[in-house]
Image (cartoon, helix red, strand yellow):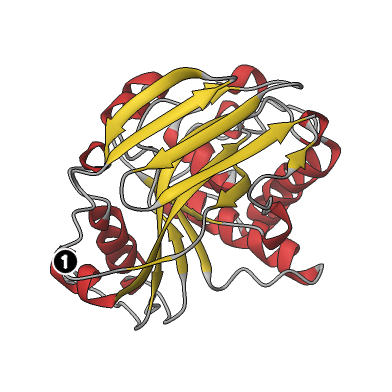
Amino acid sequence: MTLSTSDVAMLAERLDRAALERRAIAKITNEFPDMGWDDAYRIQDALRARIEARGADCHLLFKAGLTSRAKMVQMGVSEPVFGFLKPDGQVSNGDTTPATAYIHPRVEAEIAVRLKRPLKGPGCHVGDVLAAIDEVMVALEIIDSRYENFNFDLKSVIADNTSAAGWVLGEPVRFRPGMDLAHCGIVMRINDAIVSTVAGSAVLGHPAVPVAMLANLLAAQDREIPAGALILTGGASAACAVKAGDRVDLAIQGMGALSVHFS
């Protein structure tokens, strides 16, 4: 830990204003190259406090990021990251969202899970996660790094709440014992052209893995993933850029489909 409390607050305000003003900024490690991993999550926590002070309730909304090999290669990183979703970022299935609401939007195909019981580490594993899942959903995340040219390192992206911006959910499907989240097919289209075909196993081998990792990360702060929490388990493939006029369709085997338009 290298950053002072005032530095953490200043950087959280900088990232918050960049998002509100839809303005790209230089990645923060340019100015603070020696900041630590704890510092990055401290900035993210301060950012969440600012958002919640405006009336948002984020305590049941979690997300994993950089969870597929393709995405890790695309962004030049080697570890997943974790953040939170903003309630006002949700776009209803089938609706339209303005492209101008983002700086440089990209979309990722994901599997979302909702828990029926809390998860707490250390030692949380895939079996614990599967026993705690109540529902699964097709999910599309709209990511939008606040950094110039979508250029960042792992610490900067953690501080920036893992590029969280918007999200879309399909209809919930009750999770059943034996439902195979690792081998379900995932197909994403932009303007009817297929841009991604992967399986759920692209997410760290199984979408439950990042959920277990999140529970173990929170345990270090004596926190847990509460019952009722919604978790986006992370992009199954590289993110795809979108622009005004694009329509994105996403289907996952056994879970259904969703769509969103960018105006």
**Residue displayed at 33% across by 40% down:** 67
Task: Identify whether 193 is placed above or below 39.
Answer: above
Give the number of marks. 1
**Residue displayed at 65% across by 27% down:** 247
**Residue displayed at 20% across by 60% down:** 179
Residue 21 appears in view: yes
Q: Position of residue 125 (x, y in %)?
A: 16, 66
Sort mark 1 into few (<14), some (14-19) or many (20+) by Cα contacts within 10 Å.
some
Q: Position of residue 159 (x, y in %)?
A: 55, 46
* Amino acid at the residue labelled 1: His
Task: Identify whether 238 is placed above or below 255.
Answer: above
Q: Position of residue 213 (x, y in %)?
A: 27, 59
Task: Identify whether 135 is placed above or below 188.
Answer: below
In the rendered image, which quarter contains the C terminus? top right
**Residue displayed at 37% across by 81% down:** 116
**Viewer-nearest residue: 76 or 138:** 138
The residue where tag 1 is placed is: 125
Mark 1 element type: loop
Q: Is residue 7 left or right of residue 171?
A: right
Q: Is residue 182 left or right of residue 173?
A: left
**Viewer-nearest residue: 246 or 57:** 246
Residue 1 appears in view: no
**Viewer-nearest residue: 64 or 107:** 107
